[in-house]
Image (spheres, rainbow, N blue to C red):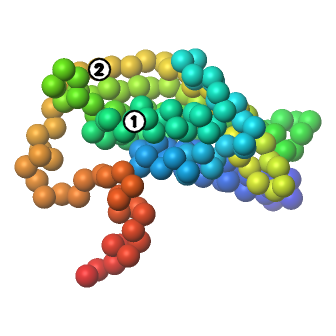
Amino acid sequence: MDDKKLERYMAKSEIYELVCKYMRGLDRLDRLLLKSVFHEDAYCDYGFIKTDPDTFSQFCMDALKEHVANHHMIGNSLIEFDNDDENTAYGEIYFNAYHKTIENGVNTDVIIAGRYLDRYERRDSIWKIAYRSEVNDWSRTEPTNDPYFDDSDCHRGKRQDDDVYHRERMHKP
């Protein structure tokens, strides 16, 4: 493998990790993690909000904190490099976002499928998001039907106290 291919492969891995951190930041209500994937001067265009990463990350925390739970899944991730600039790449990242909410006293599932359209820039050898927009392709809202977990003793996802932040819990007692 030549050096350019290897460098692009490594860059794609770094960029994909940004996407994963973005999703964890949303699901775990981790504002600092969410904000960290953006360059400070990045632009976030979600249609209903067009702003900087600091304002956007706070908006997300405020919007999601009232939800019972969130689960963002990454699908197809196509990352392409600008042929004229090795420090710029573009991404189309498919996602499914599952939101468990309470609507009029009823547990409700809101499912959104869409894509993030991104521009990534490498600055000082670090890749981050310079521009992100969200395109929503479809959504569905319906009453929840998950009593299995209500009566079981299984582990449940949490926000800031989720096990992912406590590696000491990942050892046999």
Count of marks, rendered view: 2
Residue 155 in sight: yes
Neighbour tally class for label 1: few under 14, some 14-19, many 20 plus, Cα within 10 Å: some
Q: Quadrant of the N terminus?
A: bottom right
Q: Residue 19: x percent and y percent?
A: 58, 44
> For this rendering, which residue is in front, 133 or 88?
133
Q: Which amino acid type corresponds to the residue marked 1 in the rendered image?
A: Leu
State the residue at coordinates (7%, 49%).
151
Q: Amino acid at mark 2?
A: Thr
Q: Secondary structure at mark 1?
A: helix
Q: Quadrant of residue 111?
A: top left
Name the residue rendered at 51%, 47% in the picture: 31
- Secondary structure at badge 2 equals strand
Question: Can residue 79 be seen here?
Answer: no
Say if 170 sits above or below 24 in the image: below
Determine which residue is flagged by label 2: 141
Residue 99, position in %: x, y? Answer: 34, 33
Disc 1: which residue: 64
The numbered mark, 1 or 2, whose residue comes first in the sequence reads 1
Q: Residue at x 41, y 49 (%)?
A: 28
Q: Is residue 64 left or right of residue 86?
A: left
Residue 7 in which image quadrant: bottom right
* Label placed on residue 151: none
Classify 15 as above or below 48: below
Q: Residue furthest right?
A: 84
Are dots 1 and 2 in contact, CB under 8 Å? no
